[in-house]
Image (cartoon, rainbow, N blue to C red):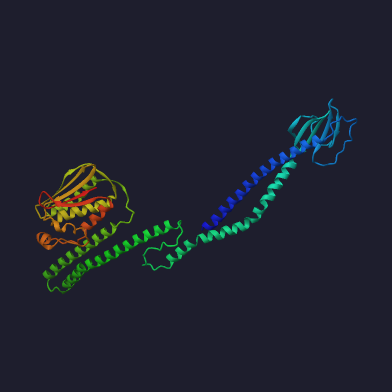
Amino acid sequence: MRSIRRQLLFSLLALVVAGVGLAGWLIYRQALAEANELFDYQLQEIAAALPSEPFSQILSSRDTGNEGIVLQIWSRNGMLMYYSHPRAPLAPRAELGFSTERTDRGDWRVYGAIVGDNVVQLAQPVSVRNRLAANVALRTLWPLIVLLPFLGLAIWVVVGRGFVPLARLARALDTRHPEALDPLPERRLPREVMPLVHALNALLERLDKALDTQKAFVADAAHELRTPLAAVQIQAQLVARAKDEDTRREALADLQAGVTRATRLAGQLLALARSEPDGQRRAQPVDLHALLDDCVATYAPLAQQRGVDLGIEESASATVQGDADALRVMFSNLLDNATKYTPGGGRVDVSLREEDGHPVVRIADSGPGIPVEERARVFDRFYRVGSGATRARTDVTGSGLGLAIVRRVADQHDARIGLDDSAAGGLQVEVRF
C-alpha cells in the first residue's frame, strides 16, 4: 500500500539532496574561480619579485618533489639558467602571459613574463586549485550534509502533523452511525482538505435523498401491494370453499385476474426502481423512428384485441442520446395507457416530428382524457385519476405508476412531458427532447 507520507518524505529529501548537490557544484565553481584569480595573482607577484639582472652563472637545479609552483628562468638568448623542478613535465618554452598546458601528469597553469634581461616561466598544477576549491565547497556543505537525517525526521513530523485533519476526518466518518448522513463540519479545516469535505458532504446529501426516496418507495410499494395480495388471499380462500364446479371456476377466474394485477403491479414497481437516477445511464445514439415503429408494432395486436385503432400518423427521422431500453419502457407505458383507457372503436395516433431542431413525440387518443386540474398530479407515484373521470367510463385497473415511470425516464433524457387535449377529444401526451 502506497504511503503519501513516505512518498512526500522521499520526494522532499530527494529535492533537498539535489539542491545541496547543485549548491555544492555552484560553490565549487565559485571557489575555483576565486582560487584561479588568487593563484594567478600569486604567480604574477612571484615573477615580479625575481631579480632583473642577468645571472652570471646557472643556478643549481634542485628537485624537492614539491608539486607546488615550478620556476624556470632563461636568458634572452634562450639559455636555461634555472629550473626548480627538472622532473616537472613542462615544455621547454616560455610563452608570455597566462596559458594552460596539458601534460601526461595533468593540466598546468603557466605564466610567462620578461623580468629584466631574463625570461621567467612559473607553473602550477591545476589539481592544486581544484583540490582547494573542492575543500572549500565540502567545508561549506558539510553542516548541511550532517543535518540531512535531522531534516528528514523534521519532514516526517511536519508531514504527519499536516495529515492530522485527514486522520480526524477519517475517525469522524468511521465512528458515524450508518444512518447519520448530516454534513461533516467544515470549521478549523485546512484549505486543502475543504474540497474533500465539500465532495463528501455533497455525496452524503445525495445519499440522504436517495435513502429518503428508497424509504418512500418501499413504503408506497408495500402499501400498494397489500391490497392486491389481500385480494388474492381472499380469492384463494373462495376457491377452497367453493362447493360446486361453477363457483370454483368463477373463483379461479377471479384469482387469476388478481394474480395478473399483482404481477403487473410488481412489474411496474420494478420498472420504476430501474428508472431511478443513479448516474449510470448509458448515453448512446437512439433512432427514435425505429424505436417508435417497434413499440407500435408490439402493441398493435393488443390494441386490435381491445378494439382500438393504433397507428403512426407521421414519423420523421430523429436521433437522441440516451438509453434505448429506458426509452422503450417510457413509450410502452404511454402506448399501454392510451390503448387501455381508449374505449372500443376509438383510435390512438402516434407522431414523430422535428420542431425547431428538437424531436417531438405525440401520442393522442380518443379516450376520456384527464381533467386539467388533475394533470399536475398524475405523474406522482400511485396516484390515479378519480373514479368520476376515468374508472366509471373505462372500468380499467392500474397501479398509478405508469406516468411516474414516464416522467422519470423523461427527466433522465432531459425531455419535457406535456399533457393536452387531443383533436379526438381524448388526451395528447407530448414528449419534447
Residue 198 in the figure: left or right of residue 304:
right
Residue 247, how many percent across, how many down? 12, 70
Residue 367 in the figure: left or right of residue 416:
left
Give the camera-side residue of 324 and 124. Answer: 124
Residue 393 in the figure: left or right of residue 237:
left
Residue 154 in which image quadrant: bottom right
Instruction: Say which residue appears at 14% left-offset and 58% top-offset.
Output: 373
Instruction: Say which residue appears at 16% left-offset and 54% top-offset.
Output: 338
Q: Is residue 431 above or below residue 223?
A: above
Residue 183 in which image quadrant: bottom left
Q: Residue furthest right?
A: 57
Q: Is residue 224 above or below residue 80?
A: below
Whether residue 232 is visible: yes
Residue 71, how many percent across, how many down? 82, 35
Instruction: Say which residue appears at 59% left-offset and 53% top-offset.
Output: 13
Q: Residue furthest top?
A: 77
Give the camera-side residue of 355 and 120. Answer: 120
Give the camera-side residue of 159 and 235. Answer: 159
Residue 415, how many percent across, how many down? 25, 50
Residue 417, how many percent across, how many down? 21, 52
